[in-house]
Image (cartoon, rainbow, N blue to C red):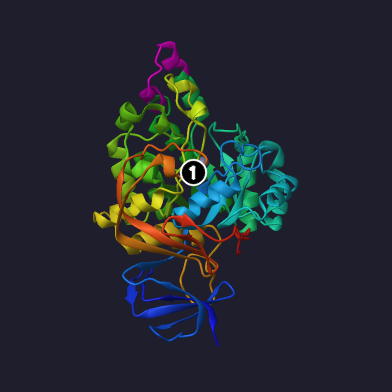
């Protein structure tokens, strides 16, 4: 009997190794068999992966697709096209929408608005603000994947609960078996330094970096770790940017606190001096710091302290983003499409193995965000989410060609080697050779607890 799809002749990559000689058969969106090449002669569709690597679908647990509320920056269609183009099969979308996704009502409304628009699968993140803490159990029941607390000011102005509320929130999240993620920056420190720098007349890009020093991040991480230990709650540190942060997380993990961390390509590959070249384009919260911090993050990634590569895909318009006065520029830039080529280039340069990349960008995110084993692995019975990469293919990142509404990236003009050439979501090819194909069939994925 014919199956729906067979992926032939590829080299299958898992965190444990690379296996040659098997084909993958897909039926009704699931992997139904993995067996030696030529085992599945009858199929409706074939993907020939000769000479290429077959990866479990890449997962980006940190994107802002901006819908509802900020569709002029991005929407679920364009954001998910960017994801598919970047080899990403599942995203977790952030809640700083209008209205905030922080109540069951807002969640249901968002779910309806984005239905049938996404090319990739998605989980939704709920914001925890002061008034909605007690909604946590209901949000978990409704299908939220993860809860987010913005400990520092950010786009959309999601207010942080006070420390009492935060501890209560951690206790409630612990009961759900889900994870709470934090944007860890201390507002009081940043407000003080921002006022001081403005008072001195500073408007240059590096003033932004000075206004948000490592200690602002470290203080918030430390506090979140204390609360997570007290509440026995799974904690995730979004967009880790500092050496001090890596050290705190490592120490907490050694003590048995259930804390994970994510960093992104900009923190790994750029440093704050790059702002002298690209100006406010690189403005991000937390900021990209000196090389010393980037190296500490690399070390953390390779020794297992930092378990996830995410992008914080944050699209904005040029009018919002490009400013002479750094204080007037909005933080963030798109990243979901460029992350994989940038990181595969690092694989080609020998900085990490393809197996480690798969662990950081697929298996670990799936495990930590309650998507495993449905996502994050290639085995019989799982969703047929597959990213096929050509490690020899070279390209240049061109901001004009991004699928996001936002055509702004600090990586514009970067040469890359190693590109995704197929993105397959539950057996549906949604990207082939950089072109979006098929229909938006992405679904909301409820967490497995
Ligand atoms: Zn973010």
Query: Residue 77: horizontal and vertical position, in percent?
Result: 58, 49
Nearest the viewer among 196 and 58 is 58
Looking at the image, which residue is at 52% across and 69% down? Answer: 373
Quadrant location of the C terminus in the rendered image: bottom right
Question: Which quadrant of the view contains residue 65?
Answer: top right
Q: Is residue 114 above or below residue 321?
A: below
Query: Residue 62: horizontal and vertical position, in percent?
Result: 51, 48
Q: Residues within 10 Å of mark 1 (few under 14, many from 20)?
A: many
Q: Is residue 199 above or below residue 425?
A: above
Nearest the viewer among 333 and 61 is 333
Residue 323 visible to the viewer: yes
Residue 230 visible to the viewer: no
Quadrant location of the N terminus in the rendered image: bottom right
Is residue 199 a member of the stretch shown in magenta? yes
Disc 1: which residue: 313
Question: Which quadrant of the view contains residue 441?
Answer: bottom right
Q: For this view, does 393 lie left or right of residue 251?
A: left
Is residue 14 a member of the stretch shown in magenta? no
Q: For this view, does 138 lie left or right of residue 47?
A: right
The magenta-colored residue range is 195-209
Looking at the image, which residue is at 49% across and 31% down? Answer: 186
Nearest the viewer among 371 and 237 is 371
Looking at the image, which residue is at 44% across and 34% down? Answer: 284
Nearest the viewer among 341 and 372 is 341
Classify mark 1 as within 8 Å of ligand 1 or not, answering yes or no: yes
Q: Is residue 209 above or below residue 22?
A: above
Query: Residue 368: horizontal and vertical position, in percent?
Result: 50, 58
Magenta-colored segment: predominant secondary structure: helix
């Amino acid at each position: 009997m014919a199956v729906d799809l067979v992926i032939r002749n590829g080299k299958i990559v898992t965190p444990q190794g690379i296996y040659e000689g098997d084909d993958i058969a897909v039926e009704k969106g699931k992997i139904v068999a993995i067996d030696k090449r030529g085992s599945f002669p009858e199929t409706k569709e074939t993907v020939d992966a000769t000479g290429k690597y077959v990866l479990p679908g890449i997962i980006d647990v940190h994107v802002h697709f901006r819908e509802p509320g900020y569709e002029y920056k991005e929407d679920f269609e364009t954001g998910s096209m960017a994801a598919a183009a970047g080899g990403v099969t599942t995203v977790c979308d952030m809640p700083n929408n209008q209205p905030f996704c922080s109540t069951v009502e807002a969640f249901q409304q968002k779910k309806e608005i984005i239905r049938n628009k996404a090319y990739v699968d998605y989980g939704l993140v709920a914001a925890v603000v002061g008034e909605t803490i007690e909604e946590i159990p209901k949000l978990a029941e409704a299908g939220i994947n993860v809860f987010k607390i913005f400990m520092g000011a950010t786009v959309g102005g999601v207010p942080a609960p006070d420390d009492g509320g935060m501890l209560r929130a951690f206790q409630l999240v612990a009961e759900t078996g889900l994870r709470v993620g934090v944007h860890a920056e201390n507002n009081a420190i940043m407000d003080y330094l921002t006022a001081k720098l403005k008072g001195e007349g500073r408007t240059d890009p590096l003033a932004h970096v000075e206004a948000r020093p490592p200690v602002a991040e470290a203080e918030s991480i430390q506090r979140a770790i204390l609360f997570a230990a007290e509440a026995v709650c799974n904690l995730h540190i979004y967009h880790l940017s500092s050496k001090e942060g890596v050290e705190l997380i490592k120490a907490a993990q050694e003590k048995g606190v259930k804390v994970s961390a994510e960093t992104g390509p900009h923190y790994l590959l750029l440093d704050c001096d790059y702002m002298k070249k690209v100006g406010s384009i690189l403005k991000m919260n937390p900021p990209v710091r000196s090389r010393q911090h980037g190296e500490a993050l690399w070390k953390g990634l390779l020794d297992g302290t930092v378990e996830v590569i995410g992008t914080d895909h944050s699209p904005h318009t040029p009018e919002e983003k490009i400013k002479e006065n750094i204080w007037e520029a909005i933080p963030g830039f798109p990243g979901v499409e460029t992350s994989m080529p940038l990181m595969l280039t690092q694989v080609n340069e020998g900085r990490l193995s393809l197996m480690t990349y798969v662990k950081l960008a697929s298996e670990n995110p799936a495990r930590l965000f309650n998507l495993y084993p449905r996502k994050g692995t290639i085995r019989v019975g799982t969703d047929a989410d597959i990213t096929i990469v050509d490690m020899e293919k070279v390209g240049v990142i061109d901001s004009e060609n991004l699928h996001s509404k936002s055509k702004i990236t600090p990586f514009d003009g970067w040469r890359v080697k190693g590109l995704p050439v197929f993105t397959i979501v539950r057996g549906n090819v949604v990207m082939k050779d950089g072109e979006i194909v098929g229909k938006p069939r992405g679904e909301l994925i409820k967490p497995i607890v």
